[in-house]
Amino acid sequence: MPSPRPPYRVAIIGTGGIAHAHAEALTELSERARLVAVADVDPTRAAEFADRFSVPHVFNNTQALLESGDLDLVHICTPPQTHAPLASKVMRAGVTALVEKPTALSLREMDQLATVQEQTGSKVLTVFQHRYGAAAVRLRRLARSGALGRPLVATCETLWYRPDAYFEVPWRGRWDVEGGGPTMGHGIHQFDLLLSVLGPWSQITALADRQTRPTDTEDVSIAAVRFAGGALATVVNSLLSPRETSRLRFDFEHATVELEHLYGYREEHWRFTPAPGHEELSDLWTNGDEPDVTSGHRLQIEAVFDAWEAGEEPGVCLLDARRTLEFAAATYASAFRGVRVAAGELTDDDPFAESMDGGAVPWEPVKEALV
């Protein structure tokens, strides 16, 4: 019997809030991975993070981290405007980059990453952890098998609440740093899951507004979507909703599948309703021996390792992530231009391929300039 392979060597760039979720996931996977290094421009924060998670090596810049030793995977947990440059640097060092969403701030940056990926042979993966919960995996399998019939109608709602104080952080609410509001930074997880189930979208008609928050970006957006397979869907992204919830509903010919949670789901958050005459489908939905683990970073990181060991390409690959980012860009383009936008329409010379605001935001900025 072959001996087990040594644990994967993993590093994290950026030790702010979301990095803790990554480190905790790696701690749970300690038999398969070792967090061997971290880097952050804030040395005190990096040292505290390293002490908490027993990380042996701490660096104050990315290049030093990449030169410190052989690495298998580097997690990028920095502010969004740094994601693409750092992912390029990691790939050029011959290492796979796992990037927090959004992968980049524009479709143009995504295409630049694709060029680096082709040049280096290294990969950039994006964190969309809700794809990996057991129920979501099961739903995709049943949908693709045809057992549920054609998808007909869907709703996707990220109804969250962020008070004015949330935007007191200087970099929040800026197009050039975050890339957008709840469409880019909050609802993207839910509509990525929607897209992973329903497949390619074909056209979007959207609205977006800054209703009340002190932000340069939108605080709410609403889209009506037609999918290539014929399904129609609505997608709502809000930071104005005091009763917070994240909801998805899929109406297939033979069943309705619903999910309501907030920041992560388990089996109890799903509901399966067969159509009359299709009651036997409930047996296909019933959870068997799958572990009932909250959808989160651990499941996606574990899936990366599983794919490597099976000789397969891990998700979420750059092409998949680009489809999701294009959905966000098309939402903004439709809302700010007041037109329907088709998939593939935002070509490289389109302002909305260069930036999510497209130079067409209809309200005045309110954030003070960053020093």
Image: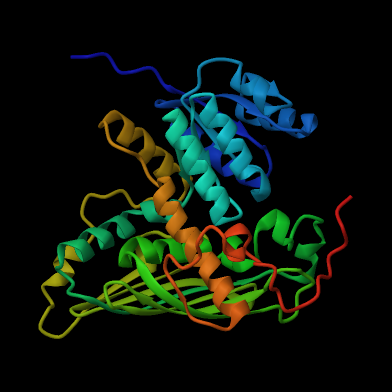
Q: Position of residue 249 (x, y in %)?
A: 37, 75
Q: Is residue 172 above or below residue 41?
A: below
Front residue (pair 245, 321): 321
* Residue pictured at 14% horizontal, 68% vertical: 147
Q: Position of residue 346 (x, y in %)?
A: 50, 65
**Residue 230 seen by the camera:** yes
Q: Position of residue 281 (x, y in %)?
A: 14, 71
- The color scheme shown is rainbow
Q: Is residue 281 above or below residue 135?
A: below
Front residue (pair 280, 335): 335
Specify the quadrant of the image occupied by residue 6: top left
**Residue 25 seen by the camera:** no
Judge from the rendering whether residue 110 lies leftward or rightward of residue 360; answer left or right.
left
Q: Is residue 161 above or below residue 192?
A: below
Residue extending farthest front? 349
Quarter in which the N terminus is drawn = top left
Specify the quadrant of the image occupied by residue 154: bottom left
* Residue pictured at 81% horizontal, 70% vertical: 365
* Residue pictured at 61% horizontal, 44% vertical: 83
Judge from the rendering whether residue 156 lies leftward or rightward of residue 80; answer left or right.
left
* Residue pictured at 28% horizontal, 78% vertical: 230
Judge from the rendering whether residue 313 lies leftward or rightward of residue 14; answer left or right.
left
Number of numbered discs on residues: 0
Front residue (pair 349, 318): 349
Q: Position of residue 84 (x, y in %)?
A: 59, 43
